[in-house]
Amino acid sequence: MELFFSQLDLPSFPAVPSAPPKAVTVVTVKLSNSSSISVSWEPPPAEMQNGIIQEYKVWCVGNDTQTRYHINTTVDGTFLSTVLKGLLPGILYQVEVAAVTSAGVGTHSQPVSILIKLPAEAPSEPSEDSDEGSVSLAEQITDVVKQPAFIAGIGGACWVILMGFSVWIYCRRKKRKELSHYTASFNYTPAGT
């Protein structure tokens, strides 16, 4: 009987990945007015994935003397990079990545350190391609339009325009009613017949 079971090709249950993602790289990216980092990696070796990789977990932890900052995200298993936004300048961040199968989270990668430089420390390199280092006009407009003050201002302006139009219509109708009253009293009636 033991021979029979050893010859069956039973499916094995997935396990957590036994190796971390390879070649984790972290670089700073300048998007609009916030500091961001781009994190990229390669999947763990195929023989150590232990199932289908469904997603990747990315942890970004920064410390200063008083506060600990966390930016964590989950990326679909078909993607091998992500951008983390809203990092604070002057903080040293540690980034780790792990693959996830249906069995759970696998081994974390070695931490990769990155220091977000203060704006005064950031090098200003003139580039040959003017679009590369600068933020496009469309991105700038999008950033402004998303601001609550801009949205409130547009709402207030629309309200003022609508109220002005309503007052204009009210005054116009009131004048017409006054004029229609006079037209009836000025009708010619012959006298003395």
Image (tube, rainbow, N blue to C red):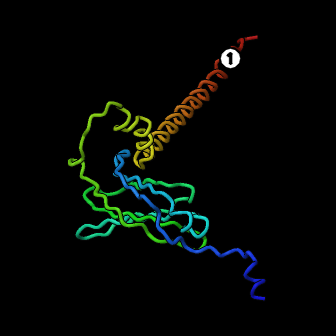
Whole-percent x, y for residue 165 in the image: 53, 34
Q: Is residue 191 above or below residue 157?
A: above
Q: Quadrant of the N terminus?
A: bottom right
Whole-percent x, y for residue 46 in the image: 56, 63
Q: Which of 61/188 is in front?
A: 61
Whole-percent x, y for residue 25 in the image: 39, 55
Q: Which of 192/86 is in front?
A: 86
Whole-percent x, y for residue 28 in the image: 34, 51
Residue beneath the point at 24% across and 40% down? 124
Residue 50 as seen in the image, left or right of residue 22 = right
Residue indicated by mark 1 = 187
Q: Residues within 10 Å of mark 1 (few under 14, many from 20)?
A: few
Q: Is residue 128 above or below residue 157?
A: above
Rendered image quadrant of residue 140: top left
Q: Give the structural element (helix, strand or loop) at label 1.
A: loop
Q: Check disc 1 and give the amino acid type.
A: Asn
